[in-house]
Amino acid sequence: MSLHRTPLLCALVVATSGACNALTGASSLGVCEEAACEDGAPLPGRADADVDAGNSDASGDGAVAVACRDGERRCTGRVAESCTAGAWAGAACAEACEEGECKPWPSCRTAAGATCGVAGTDSCCAAPAVPGGTFERRTGGSPATVSSFALDKYEVTVARFRAFLASGAAFEAGAPSAGAGAHPKIPGSGWQPTWTPRLSSSRASLDNALAGGTWTEQPGTNENKPITRVTWFTAFAFCAWDRGRLPTYAEWMYAAAGGAEQRTYPWSSPPSSAVVDETHANYNCRFSPPGFSCPPSYCDVATASSPCDDTACAAAGGTCVTPPCTGCVSPADVAPVGVRPLGAARWGHLDLAGNAEEWVLDRTGSRTSVVLPMPCNDCAQLLPASPTSGGTTASYLMLPGGDWRSTSVNAMRPLGTPTVERFDQTNDTAGFRCARD
């Protein structure tokens, strides 16, 4: 960032100190060595590259501190700094820092759908910090260590996805650059250009791919529901665009299990508590009445008790009838994110069980047998996310967490076996959230 000083840099060396001419940069005895003149006083000299970068402190490379101009702003990582009385001061941003100002992540910069939770006042892009540590990825085995990271509190919503689409980054033409969205400690974990054709080529093709999930072509009542029917590739591209990345399987499970607490469910307190019901998670197709149920069969001509007995019903001249099940309608039974606050995990994350299964970074090689990498220190399994053997087999991608259709409470245990899907699979139970570094 340039400091935009009006005075000129000087080329000669002063013999003794002298006042600087604020118009020309010259002193009575010469000029200010490699320094700009400001308000009649010379500023300490430093390399132009350091001035342009807006650095204010010695960086270990011999750079000399330079005074800043009041009102100037800059970012140092995710810290927004401003110049007051010639000194930089700032504080960490909750989300992004751009041009010296704290801003929401890109997906939450429109008013529509930017707030989530029961009260509707929380940022949909809130990303609570998760302190690093070690835990067991399986009951009684498979230890893993993860570094500290941040994880989106909520699943990515339809409204956030709509901002992604509007940016153009959801399509082949706006695909991430090579290496984008990488885990900082896992080489080769970023975007691969060979994946770009897996993104939609047009709005029409994307609308078609998302049909049957929570997506609507125009904003409607689903804006705060998790986006579903997205492919792993689209989820990866979203997180890269939103200044994040997909979490690893180990990171996701660590957050859901409460780290070393090894919680039975994300909300379990004490950790061994097995309390689970529909106030903690959205499952069993019960968000939108009537709840999921399958009435017993009956005989269409007799009054015999249900379920229908084929022999008795036939003897009465009738036929057994099996009524259709009720409930379990997508997207009606998908809940808005964060409406089960009793389901909060240890660090405040919501819907880590139920509602939508979630894509993670890991790519396994089998749909029936998930082998976890060992040892695991900030690890991920990165088998090719593409067809193999002439397209006859495919890599499989992992989705933990259970979903709104789950009828078994065991499906929502963090330490359970994840669902795995083909690399190109979409379904109305698959969503995602992003990790941040």
Image (spheres, rainbow, N blue to C red):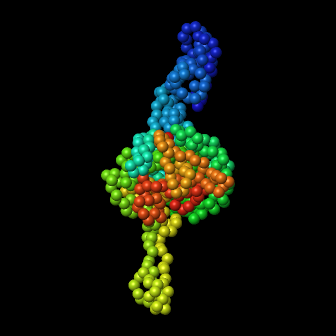
Residue at point 59%, 60% (across, down): 210
Q: Residue farthest to the left?
A: 270
Give the residue displayed 63% in from the left and 43% down from the top.
177
Report if residue 269 is visible in the image: no
Give the quadrant of the N terminus. top right
Q: Residue at x 42, y 81 (%)?
A: 307
Q: Name which quarter of the figure residue 49 lies in.
A: top right
Image vertical order of residue 428 relative to residue 322, above or below: above
The location of residue 251, given as percent across then percent down, is 46, 46
Between residue 3 and residue 388, name the one nearer to us: 388
Q: Residue at x 50, y 66 (%)?
A: 332
Q: Quadrant of residue 231?
A: bottom right
Residue 240 place in picture, x, y as percent: 57, 45
Left or right of residue 148: residue 52? right
The answer to whether residue 175 is left or right of residue 142 is right
The number of numbered discs placed on residues in the rendered structure image is 0
Q: Position of residue 207 (x, y in %)?
A: 62, 60
Measured as percent of width and height from the top left, residue 46 is found at 57, 20
Of residues 423 and 114, the one nearer the viewer is: 423
Please state which of residues 43 and 264 is positioned toward the viewer in this rendering. 264
280 up-or-down from 101: above or below: below
In the rendered image, is residue 280 in sight?
A: yes
Q: Is residue 172 above or below residue 57?
A: below
Residue 27's place in the image compared with 330, above or below, is above
In the image, 423: left or right of 133?
right
Of all residues, the one furthest to the top in this rendering is 15
